[in-house]
Amino acid sequence: MPTLSTRDYRNILIALSIYITSLMAANTLGIKLMPGPFGLHLSVGVFMFPIVFIMTDVIGERYGKQMAKFFVLAGLISTALYLAYTLISLAAPWSPDGAWAQSAYGTIFGVSARFAIASLIAYAVGEYQDVISFFFVKSRVAKYFWLRSTISNIWSQAFDTIIFMTIALYGVYPNEKLVVIMVSWWLFKIAMGILYTPLSYLGLYLLRAKPITTE
C-alpha cells in the first residue's frame, strides 16, 4: 500500500461514499422497470450500476489494485448488511397503526430482498472480475485508461448481468425472453459505461490522476 496523505484519505472517503451510494441505489431503486428498445424493458439501475464499476477502475488507477479490492469488499459488506436489515424488517411484526403500508412494503422490499441476494452474488463475482481484468489489460494490452476500463467493464458486466438476471428473474420470464433481456441489459450497461467515460477522467483529475504504481 502507498503512503497516503490527509488529502488522499479525504478523496478516498468521498469516492467510497459515491461508490456505496451508487451500489445501494442500484439495489433498491433498480426494481423499477422502464421501457427499453425492441419492446423490452430496462431497470433504472442501469444508470447507477456502471458508476460502481467505473469507480473501482478510477480508484485502482490512482491507488492500486489493493485499494480497488478494498472498495469491492466494502460494497460486499454493505450489500450483505442491507440484505440482513431487509430480512429482519420483513420478519418483524406490524403495528395496526402501520397496516396501511403493509402490503406495499412487503411487495417492494420482498422483491428488493431477492434483488439484493442476486446483486450480492453477482456483485462479488463481477466486481472482482473487473479489478482483475482491469489490471490484466493494463499490464498486457491497453495503454489508455479509457480502453482498459471499457474492456474490463465489457467482461465483468457480462458476469454480473448473467448471474444477477438468473437469480433475480429466473422463472419470471420464459428462458428465451430472459436471455434476450440479459443481452439488452448488458449492452445498455456497457453503453452507459462508455457514456460515463468523461466522468472517469473527471474523477482521475479530482484525485490528481498521476498513478501510484503499486498493486
Image: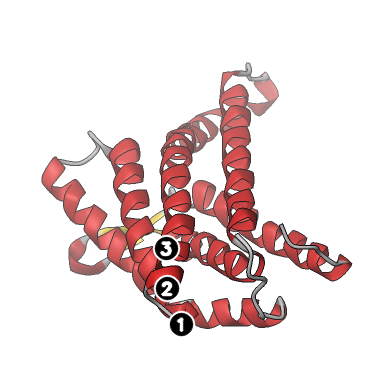
SS class of the residue under badge 2?
A: helix
Tell me residue 183's x, y (percent): 23, 58
Tell me whether the residue at label 1 lies in contact with that at label 3, contact meaning CB atoms closer than 8 angstroms.
no
Amino acid carrying mark 2 in the image: Arg
Q: Which mark sits nearer the N-terminus, 1 or 3?
A: 3
Tell me whether the residue at label 3 lies in contact with that at label 2, contact meaning CB atoms closer than 8 angstroms.
no
Q: Residue at x 25, y 37 (%)?
A: 172
Amino acid carrying mark 1 in the image: Tyr
**Of 111 and 102, the residue lying toward us:** 111
Which mark, residue 144? 1
Amino acid carrying mark 3 in the image: Phe
- Crowding around mark 3 (Cα neighbors within 10 Å: few <14, some 14 to 19, many 20+) is some
The N terminus - image quarter: bottom right
Which mark, residue 148? 2
Quadrant housing residue 202: bottom right
Quadrant housing residue 199: bottom right
69 is higher (above) or lower (below) than 106: below
Q: Residue at x 62, y 65 (%)?
A: 59
- Crowding around mark 1 (Cα neighbors within 10 Å: few <14, some 14 to 19, many 20+) is few
Which mark, residue 136? 3
Q: Which mark sits nearer the N-terminus, 3 or 2?
A: 3
**Of 197 and 207, the residue lying toward us:** 207
Q: Is residue 146 visible?
A: yes
Tell me whether the residue at label 2 lies in contact with that at label 1, contact meaning CB atoms closer than 8 angstroms.
yes
Tell me residue 105's x, y (percent): 54, 34
Tell me residue 181's x, y (percent): 23, 54
Q: Residue at x 56, y 28 (%)?
A: 102
115 is higher (above) or lower (below) than 206: above
Which mark, residue 106? none
Tell me residue 16's x, y (percent): 68, 58
